Structure formats: structure tokens, C-alpha cells
Amino acid sequence: MSPSTEISVVEVEAAAPATICMGCWDQMKVPVPIRGPFSVPFRVFGITQSKMNPNICTICERAFRRVKKGSHFTQDATILFSDIRGYTQLSETIDPVELAQVVSEFQDQCAASIWARNGIVNKQMGDGLMAIFNFPIKATEHTQRAVEAGLDIQRRCKTSLAQLSDRFALPHGRLGVGVGIHTGPVEIGEFSKVRSDFTAIGGVVNMAARLEGCAGAGEIVLSPQAAERVPELVERATERQVNLKGIADPVNAVILGG
Amino acid sequence: MSPSTEISVVEVEAAAPATICMGCWDQMKVPVPIRGPFSVPFRVFGITQSKMNPNICTICERAFRRVKKGSHFTQDATILFSDIRGYTQLSETIDPVELAQVVSEFQDQCAASIWARNGIVNKQMGDGLMAIFNFPIKATEHTQRAVEAGLDIQRRCKTSLAQLSDRFALPHGRLGVGVGIHTGPVEIGEFSKVRSDFTAIGGVVNMAARLEGCAGAGEIVLSPQAAERVPELVERATERQVNLKGIADPVNAVILGG
């Protein structure tokens, strides 16, 4: 990350632990206790803090289709993908016990950055993750929150990944985090009879994943639509035209850091 | 899929619904009722059929670290990745409601193929999934089971995806399923404090994902190690040398179908 982007980061406090589920409140105006004495009877019935974000509850993961009409619905949201550049070569080089530590540390740092800005860690796969901002916790400036989370992830992981690169003298470039962010309407729902946790799908999600795929170590790659929503954060960003697999026209991506 | 591979498929019956959790039995020799009257008190405490495979229980998803020494361990397993080739262009072309149906149908067909061979659907992300064979349900011929699942997935999805391609006249090639399979030691555990469902990581997992990434529509791409374990299934397969991102040497992949 360059110093110019670091100074433009707007710091936010870590989200304070909520007494009631922020998702159930924002979506249904129903107070579901998740901390304190009132949460005890709920915990007996398995309603407790979600692993996606400790300020939402397990109802949020599964039951929205019962309160929304139909099993899925369209939602304006920001999607963030993140993974470790050089992870495959790392996994070929180091001991599985050490690899496990790297993955665990990375996933936990990312989650802290995302939760502090009211996003949820919706999916984790190996060193990769997908986060959603603006569902189920509402946020008026969800794109800004996502970009701040991306900058925070880069800052948290930079030193430890650089040290790993040095220690193992990896031949194909240094380790670093790649982040991709896009914003727009996504389809939220449970898209499988066999798994019942919700996710987001659609063109916006795929584009975010593709943008992450072309991010170099230390880079945050924004779609033009995401960049437009955070003018102050991208003042000193660079532009790069990228061709993304499955997407017909080249995209003028906006790059932070690197 | 070519007729030559179709005739070499060994048909297996769908796994019969188990009365006790097959994972807890195979891993700990503990009988945990998941169906029938004895399962009722367990269900009160939230111990029920897992969404990863209905023949294992929710204990299997989370609690192995308490019974194994340490939080993760090495396991010989076969890893299968699968997704829809052309999904990104599809998501740019069709209505989100229809896209949701396609994803849901694909995920459910894949799960049926995997469960019938005692594999588990460990991760789902959009149109992609990762399956594990030989944990927590033990299988002596887990690579064969995985390849059979891959052939079954191709057979189940071929017609419906071809019809979709015709209906929307997609410009960049036809839709189809890509499958990647590799086998060897993987690290099983919970690699994040923030999410507590187990997964597999390591070089074998990454290689399986990369092999899937280079599979064309209708193809199952096996690593040489996986192919060696299923000589009868790959008698008429073709070979292709592939360069995989992050992996130093080219790999002699073995291709079924296409």
C-alpha cells in the first residue's frame, strides 16, 4: 500500500457488541437478544451469535426466506472478495501445520476488518473469502465501509505476509493480499435445498470475484461503480483497463495500493 | 461426455439413509442417532443431520477438534471441485430469478451425486463447490467414488445446461460443468476462530481447484495421482499437459469426457 492511500483511510471504531441482533432489527424490527441475561432462553433454542458476524444471530443465517416473500430477493449491496496472492506456491512450499496457521491468521484478520464495519463474512474457502455489506445489517455508506475494510485488511496483513515471503524465499514473487470490490443489486437467498445458509449471487458478485482475481499483491481493485461511490477514497488511485473472463467489455478498474 | 467414458461408469446405489451418524461412527465409534425415535432427544440439543451430507450429524461439522489431538490433522482424501463453465456470462445475460434456479438446480444435482458415494459437500460458493471423499465417512476406494461422482454430475447436468445455452444463444461457447479431482494428504480442521465448520486445506486441495480451473465444459480433469488410483475408469481417457498457476512444474492431467 502506498502512503498516499494510507492517509486517506477514514478510521472507524470496531463495531460495539450489540445487545440485540442488528440483522433482525434492521430487516424485521424484531428485537432478538444475543447478549446479556435476556439472551439465555434464546440460546436454549439455539438462537445465538452468528459466525458470519457476532452482532447478528443464527436466525439471520437461515430464516429470512420465511419473512420475505419468496425464497430470494434483490438487495443493493457491496461485495468484497479477498485472498492471498501466492497462496498456491506457499501451500506447495511450507509445512501443513504452518499453512494452517497462515490461513487461520489471515481469515481472522479479514473478519475483524469486516465486522468492524458491519459487514458479514458470508463465505470462506481456503485462503479466500466473500463479504457482504448492507445485508442483513443496513448501512447507508456500504461501499465506503467495504473499501475501508479492504484498506484495513491490507494494512493488517502486509507485515506478516512480507515476513513469510522472506522466510521461505518464495521464487514467484512475494505474498500479499488481493482484494476486489463491486457494488450494485445482488440476489440474496438460499440457493440450494441442501444447504440453508443464505448467500448473494448475480453479475455483481461475479464481477467482484473477477476483479479480485486480477488484483496484484497489496492491491484493492474497485469496479468503476464502486469507485464512483467513494470519491474521497480514490482521489489518488490509479486506473487500469482489465479484461475479465466471461465479461464482454473491458472494465476500467480503479486500483488502490499495490 | 463421450460414450466411451459413459460405459465405463460403475453405477452405485444412492447411499441408504443411515440410522446413526456415519461420521461419528467411523471416526470415534460413537453411535449418534440421526433418524428414528432415538434421535429425538439429540435433536432437542441441536444434534441433527448435517447439511454437508444427511448421513452425518452436526457434531461432525464442529467437534472433531475436541476428540482429535490438536485442532487439525492430516488425512488421506480425495478432493473434487466443480462449477459451471460460462457461469459469469450467464449471470450477465439472464434474469436473477432464473440464475437462482440454475444455481440451485446445479448445487442440488451435484450434492445428490456426491452423497450417493458417501462424499460431503464441504463448501459452496456461487456456482462452485468443493467435496471431500474419505472424511468424515471412511471409504477405501475414495478416489474411485469421487471420479464416479464427477461422471454422474456431468451426466445429470449435460442436457439441462445444453438447453440453457440454446435458449439464450450465449456468445462465448456453451455452458457445461468443469470438474477437477486430486487425491493425497490434506489437512482437516477449523482454520479460523471466527467460523467453526471444518474444511480441508493444503497443496492437494489447491491442485484440485487449479485442475478444475482448466477443465473445459463437460470435462473431468484428474491429477496423475488420482488417475493412477482408478485405472479402469481412465482406460480411454486423454492426457493433456497443463501449466497451473502457482505450481512450478507442468502437470500431466488426465481428461475424461469433454
Image: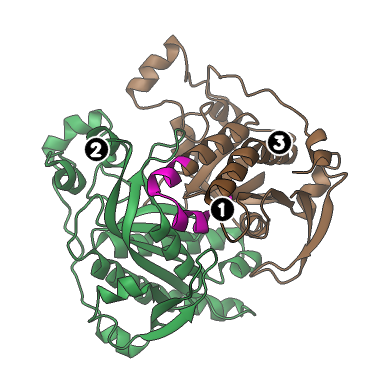
Chain colours: A green, B brown
User: Are discs 2 and 1 less than 8 Å apart at CB?
Assistant: no
Residue B17 in the image: above or below residue A158: above
Of residues B73 and A67, the one nearer the viewer is: A67
Tags 3 and 2 both on a single chain: no
According to the picture, the residue beneath numbered tag 1 turns out to be B169
The residue at which mark 3 appears reads as B145
Amino acid at circle 3? Arg
Q: Is residue B75 visible?
A: no
Residue B150 lies, in percent from the top left, at 68, 41
From the viewer's perspective, is the residue at label 3 or at label 1 nearer?
Answer: 1
Q: Amino acid at mark 2?
A: Lys
Check if mark 3's residue and mark 1's residue have beta carbons within 8 Å: no
Q: Residue at x 81, y 39 (%)?
A: B3
Identify the chain of the residue marked 1, using the numbered disc in the image: B
Query: Which mark, by number, is residue A68?
Result: 2
- Residue A45 visible, this angle: yes
- Position of B94 with respect to B239 (left or right) is left
Q: Residue at x 38, y 40 (%)?
A: A190
Residue A174, compared with residue A26, is above or below; it is below
Q: Give the residue type at disc 1.
A: Ala
Q: Is residue A23 magenta?
A: no
